[in-house]
Image (tube, helix red, strand yellow):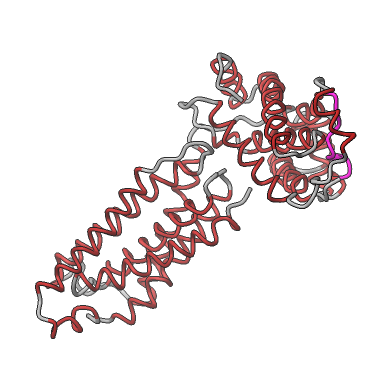
Amino acid sequence: MKTDDLINLLGTNIEPVKDGQLRNTLLVALAAGAATALCLMLLFLGAPDEILGGQYRSLKFLGLIFTFSLIASGTHFLLKAARPGNSNRKPLIFIGLLFFSIVSAGVIALMLSHPSSWGGMIFGPQWAACLVCIPLFSIAPFVSLIWALRKEAPTNLAWTGAVAGIVAGALGAAAYTLHQPAGSIPFIVIWYAGPIAVFAIVGAVLGPKLLRW
Amino acid sequence: MTIGSDEPELRALMLAGLDGDDKSHKSLLTRLSTYLRAYFRGQLVRIGRGPSEVEDLVQETLIALHMSRHTYDRSQLLMPWVYAIARYRLIDYLRRTKFAGLDVPVESADGIFADDDVAAVDSGIDLMKLLDQLTPKMRQSIQFIKLDGLSVNETAARTGMSPSAVKVSVHRGLKALSLLVRERKPS
C-alpha cells in the first residue's frame, strides 16, 4: 500500500472529536467501579451499623483519608498517563509518600504500645473479612479502569497498570472501611495498604499485556 | 524528528482535524509522514535494519496517530505527542520483529542512501487483503465511507444499516485493521 493511499483512507469523512472525551471515559469508568464496589459492600456486609465509626471514628476517617488520597492522586496520574508523551511523576511521588507515612505511623503506633497488645492491634476486628473483601471489592474498579485505559494510548504500560491497581485497591479498601473501620493504624497498614500494594504489583505485571495498543 | 518551527502550523491542522475537517487532517498526516520517514530511517539504519521497513513503520504510526486522535490534549504542543506515539510504535515494532529482517543482504544496503523519494514506495501492508479479513459490515462501511468517500447517510441507504451503525462499523473496522496491520506476518 502506498502511504498516500493510506492517508486518503484515514482522512476521508473523519469524525469530529469531542474535547474532554478521554477524561470522561476514565471518570465514568472510575465511577462505575466505585458504584460496583459500594453495591458489593452493601450486598455482602449490609448497611454499616455506625456510619461515623462509633468508637473508631478517627480511624475510620484516617482510613478514608488514606484511600481517597490514593484514589485522587492515582486518577490524576492516569488522566495524564493515558496520553502519549505526557508523563507526570508528581502523583507517583505523592503516592509513595502516602504509603511511607501510613507505614511510619503504624510502626510508631506499635512502638508506643506494649508488645502484648500488638496481636490485638494487627489482628483487629475481622481481619479475615478484610482480607477477603478488599480484593473482592477491587476487582470491578480494576476491570473498568483497564477497559477505559485500553481505549486510550498510554506509553508507560507498567506504571499505568500499577497505578490502575492502586486506585482499584484503594476503592475496595474505601468501600470496606465505610462498613467497618480499622481497629488500629497497624491494621490499616497490613490489611488496607498491603492488598493495595499487591494490586499495584498485579497491575504492573498485567499492564504491558492488557494495555498494549 | 525535531520540534521545529512547523509546530504552530501542524498544531493548527491537528485542531482543525479534531473538529472534523478532512482536508486539514490529510494535510497534517502527509506532512507528518515526512517527519516520521526521516525519524524511522535514522533509527532503523542505526541498528542495521533494512530501509524497506521504514514505510511499514510510517504507515503503522499514521494509523496509530489517527486512532489516538482523542488522546491529544489541545492545550499542549503537538510534536511531543506525535514523537511519543512514533517512539512507542518503533519499540513495539522492534519487539515484534526481533528475529526478522536482521539478515538484510549486503546488496540492499545501497537502497539506504540511494532512494530519497520513498513516499512512492509501497509498504509491505496489503490493504485489500487485510480488508478481506474484516466482517462484511465493517468492510462495506470502510469501502463506502473511507475509500469511495460516500457520506454516512448514503452508505446507510445502500447498506440498510442505520447511520449510527455505519459510524460504529467504520470505527470498529479501522480498529480491527490497525490490529491486523500489527499482527500481519512479516513480508
Please give the name of the residue rendered at 53% of the width and 29% of the height, measured from the top-left corner: B80
Task: Measuring from the top left, give residue B172's x and y in whole percent.
Answer: 71, 46
- Nearest the camera: B142 or A162? A162
Please give the name of the residue rendered at 15% of the width and 73% of the height, measured from the top-left corner: A110
- Nearest the camera: A46 or A155? A155
Is the magenta region chiefly helix, strand or loop? loop
Instruction: Tell me if B177 is positioned left or right of A121 in this view.
Output: right
From this viewpoint, which residue is outermost toward the front? Answer: B106
Residue A80 placement: quadrant: top left
- A139 in relation to B50, above or below: below
Task: Measuring from the top left, give residue A57's x and y in whole percent.
Answer: 15, 67
For the record, the magenta segment spans B120-129
Please give the name of the residue rendered at 45% of the width and 57% of the height, measured from the top-left corner: A162
Task: Measuring from the top left, give residue B2's x and y in whole percent.
Answer: 58, 23
Instruction: Tell me if B145 is positioned left or right of A135 in this view.
Output: right
Numbered marks: total: 0
Please give the name of the residue rendered at 76% of the width and 34% of the height, measured from the top-left corner: B54
Task: Measuring from the top left, give residue A189's x and y in whole percent.
Answer: 27, 68
Residue B42 placement: quadrant: top right
Q: What quarter of the picture does the N terminus of chain A occupy?
A: top right
Instruction: Tell me if A68 is positioned left or right of A120 in this view.
Output: right
Residue A185 placement: quadrant: bottom left
Residue B128 covered by magenta stretch = yes
Residue B161 covered by magenta stretch = no
- B37 in relation to A173, above or below: above
- Nearest the camera: A116 or B66? A116
- B101 in relation to A37, above or below: above
